[in-house]
Image: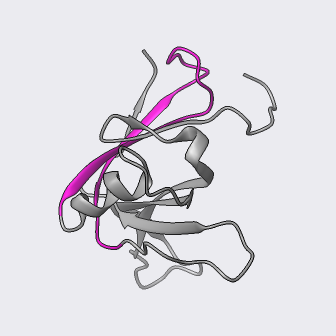
């Protein structure tokens, strides 16, 4: 896959499809930076430590059965599996599926101003390994 416009992401939460209910998605993965500089060196040296991640989902709010509120509300305090793919096509080396188990630590049922589209945003930390599937 070459350069592309982000118009066809596939996002699921515990198997429920939310692509059309999402305005944006961000999956962040990083490694801790551990300094290993010893005496006698003139530049700092570093190694990677433990990895961590988070998923941010910016939803268009929907209180209908099976939609955003009905799916997210009961997950507070538990784990949810989030899968993000660049496109709705088959998972391949050029359309990888990133899978993260997240601890649902927060949910804001209301986060809107007068006259705005009703939205809500969540950021959940990952727990365990974030995987990148290609098949």
Q: Which is nearer the eye, 18 or 8?
A: 18
Which residue: 58% across, 23% down? 88
15 to the left or right of 11: left
Residue 63: x and y in percent read 44, 57
- Colouring used for the render: one colour
Front position in the image: 25 or 44: 25
Left or right: residue 70 compared with residue 7: left
Quarter of the image with the C terminus is: top left
Q: Position of residue 13 (x, y in %)?
A: 37, 44
Q: Nearer the viewer, residue 77 or 124?
A: 77
* Residue 124 in the figure: left or right of residue 24: left
Q: Quadrant of residue 42?
A: bottom right
**126 up-or-down from 134: above or below:** below
Residue under the point 38% across and 71% down: 107
Examine the structure image and report whether residue 80 is included in the region drawn in magenta. Answer: yes
Give the residue displayed 80% in from the left and 36% down from the top: 5
The region drawn magenta spans 78-106
Give the number of marks.
0
- Farthest residue toward the left? 78
Q: Position of residue 29 (x, y in %)?
A: 46, 56
Front-most of residues 86 and 108: 108
Was residue 86 drawn as part of the magenta stretch in this picture? yes
Quadrant containing the N terminus is top right
């Amino acid at each position: 896959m070459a350069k592309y416009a982000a118009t066809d992401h596939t996002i699921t939460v515990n198997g429920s499809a939310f692509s059309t209910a999402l305005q944006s998605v961000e999956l962040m993965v990083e490694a801790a930076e551990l300094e290993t500089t010893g005496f006698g060196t003139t530049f700092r040296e570093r190694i990677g430590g433990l990895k961590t991640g988070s998923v941010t989902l910016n939803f268009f709010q929907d209180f209908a059965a099976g939609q955003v509120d009905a799916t997210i509300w009961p997950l507070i305090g538990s784990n949810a599996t989030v899968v993000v793919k660049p496109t709705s096509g088959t998972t391949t080396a050029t359309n990888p599926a990133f899978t993260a188990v997240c601890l649902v630590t927060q949910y804001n049922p209301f986060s809107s101003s007068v006259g705005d589209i009703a939205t809500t945003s969540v950021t959940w930390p990952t727990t365990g390994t974030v995987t990148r599937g290609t098949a």
